[in-house]
Image (cartoon, coloured by chain):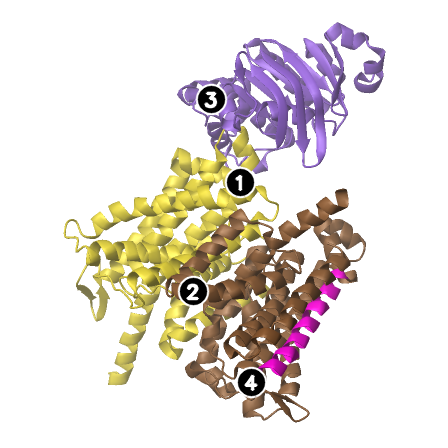
Amino acid sequence: MKLKHMAVIILASYGILAVLPVFVGHTSYVMNILIMCLIWAVVASCWDVIMGFAGIFSFGQVAFFVMGAYCSAILAITHHVPPVASIVIAGVFTAGMGVLVGLPCLKLAGPYVALVTFGVHMALQPLLKGEIGIALGSGGAAGLLNIPPISLFGYTFGADTMVPTFYLILAISLACVLTIMGMVKSYWGMAFLALKDSQPFAASLGISAFKYKLMVFAVTSFLTGIIGAVYGHFYGVLSARMLDLDLFSILMIMILAGGLGHFPGAVIGSFLVVAASELMAPLGVYRAVTMGGMVVVLVLALPDGVMGLFIRRINRVHKT
Amino acid sequence: MFEENTILLFYEITDVIIAGLSNGSVYALMAVGMTLVYGVTRAFNFAYGDFFNMGGYFAWILIVGIGLEFGGYITVFVIVLPLLFAVGYGLETFLIAPLRKRPDWENRVMMLTLGLALFLSNLYMVVFGTRLKSLPPILEGILEIGQIVFSYQDIMIFVMSLGGILLFGWMLNNTRTGMAVRAVAQNPEGARIVGIDIKRVFAATFAISTVMVGFGGILLSQKLFINPTTGGAIMVKAWVVTAFGGMGSIRGGLYAAFIIGMMEAFVGWTFGMSYTIIALFVLLLATLVIRPQGLMGKGA
Amino acid sequence: MIRVSGLNAFYGQFHVLKDVSITVEKNAVVVVLGPNGHGKSTLLKSICGLAEKTTGSIRLNDTELTGLSSEKIVDSGVTYIAETRELFPNMTVLENLKLGAFCRRARPFEAENLEKVFDLFPRLADRKSQTASTMSGGEAKMLAIARGLMSNADFLAIDEPSLGLQPNLRTEVFHTIKTINEQGITILLVEQNIPQIARLASKVYVLEEGKITFEGNRDEAVGNDHLKEIFLGM
């Protein structure tokens, strides 16, 4: 897909979202949902770039998200670091963790990468709940309460200032997504396409798969950590229960609905799925079952997601 | 002679070792099933642990739910194992085989089976509730050898898991289907040339691995509880055992299973059960860094 | 008799075979010559149901083979013998041979065929319990042919039997093929540029760039100047 098309889709999606507070700005319930759209769009896009574009089968994205959120929250609560600084530190920390996880496993075959990253995910919950986590300030099984909101130049972006907070997060989210777009369309992106076509040929050009995979891992972890930190400061509470498979699978549904490997499909996917998930709330206990079933059905029936439809449209226009 | 504390410690340690052995034997069963399915079909099954629970729940329905009297666990095996076979066979045929046409099918299979894992674990929660279920022991009573006490249950678990693995190994070498499975693992194209229906071999392999992990579930759920949410952790455990032993090596899987069973029992005993997954993970990372092909693997 | 008409085959984007038609009479040895990568293997694989995508018609006597799965085709008596080593590397010679008799058609004759094969290749009988991956190139080739014979086929599609063999072993392999043919098995064989093979053939085709460019009996092939130059090296 061309840069132009990507930019149009991203700006149109964010544009629609940016207008909505005019109509629903007074309903904090809806504003909450809109902010979730912005946050998940970044996480889903990062994950999609890793899985679909770079072809690394990583299952660690939620873990990185939680790491970023906890890192920033602990810094703010225990060490009284102002949120603006702690968010940046959290991003750098998460990027470092990304590299740390990537180093041993990115040279290995797909299922091993999936296992190690999924292992990070699985190990993080007992770690946060256990004594080590408590010693670091994770709050144990109860999680963290009273995480200070972001404040900038004396202005506090909290639950009572929903509309400004929304626009702040929109700006951060858009910046993240545009960074991803830049990455996909940059020299790096081209390198990945070359790697996909022919690994030996790419190697002859001096493109090292490992180096690029590690760089993508670092950048996406950084962005995921940042948005995780933002989530924590916006929400005010964190719990290790985020690592239950619910969030994990919702993010996966977002990617699949948008179209795996068809950035910026994940952005559209997350907007659609957040809305759909709210609509599915009346299903109660059956909701998670339905979600699992949806993953299965989407993988089988809609392999290119919503973007598949777009791409077909674009191709048709080009042909005529 | 010894201080009373020392003697108590000795008993505790023998208990831990016995637990390690009986758990390890079930892990071996699970690892063999996983090595098999990955080695033959190249499909990675993220819902593997949920089939472990499926075995446990099926047995629970029969024994506790219906209150089956006749034949006890023998009836359970006769009914549940073929059922698990059918589930695995259908899964490969209807959900995984259609994906094989795509170039990135391996990744899509991982996503699909992850969705399936979520579906199953939540289905268990809806159907059976979040309260843990327990199964009665397959054989009551204890065996005392000198000062050491074995429960018949542990002995049965150990014997039946190893018996299952040996039976499987025998079938692999001495039956037509077993030969076909080995042929496909070694050379799928060669298998097609001699007229082996590889789609059916894939399905049968998937089914056998489902039976093995479900059988493990029936055995181990008598000691632990059946917990609808543990599928992921069980899958990771089976995978760590497989990777540690060496992907594709049945013997490596056996050794790894007992090492890990022991390690887990001792970590659980000294630090608490919630640390076992962290210990597993550290072991996995160490394996991948120091010897990525595992104990007995032949390299990538 | 096998009659291939209007066969097209594709590998991904590549159109490998273009409207290929050939006929192999019962008990014949038909040789298809052609440069590497021009579709010879694909032709054999298409007949045996091993090619990715094909259109056209392949008839065995009165049965249409196109669209049948490879195991059904083996069951109807058509077996492919691979150019590359498509053996089972970690199995013994005996296990490889037994798997050759995997199809339903061959099962009742397994013992009988095993005896026949060991008569034909005494060396394999000596090495029954040796692992396939430890065999030399010539032995592996024999094992591949022997495994094909175990399927009790009427029709063998043999892919470059001389590839990678020394001249004396080649002669041996060709001699064996002749013996097999004399036992009543029809043979379709592809080769790159081996002059000896033309002497074995009752009919010769030339396949270039996915098309049949020559068709004739042995004498016509040997007499053809173009063929002499390019393939027969005479």
Q: Which disc, if any, is residue C114? A: 3
Marks 4 and 3, how far apart in space? 74 Å
* Magenta-colored segment: predominant secondary structure: helix
Colour-to-chain, brown: A
Give coordinates of residue B46: x percent, y percent.
Answer: 47, 56
Q: Residue at x 57, y 69 (%)?
A: A37
- What tint does the image give chain B? yellow
**Residue A30 placement, left or right of B234:** right
From the image, tell me which residue sits under label 4: A73
Q: Earlier in the sequence, mark 2 or mark 1?
A: 1
Q: In the rendered structure, does residue A30 fall within the stretch colored magenta?
A: no
The subunit letter for the residue under badge 4 reads A
From the image, tell me which residue sits under label 1: B186
Q: Residue at x 54, y 61 (%)?
A: A252
Give coordinates of residue A84: x percent, y percent.
Answer: 65, 86
Q: Nearer the viewer, mark 4 or mark 3?
A: 4
Element at badge 4?
A: helix
From the image, tell me which residue sits under label 2: B233
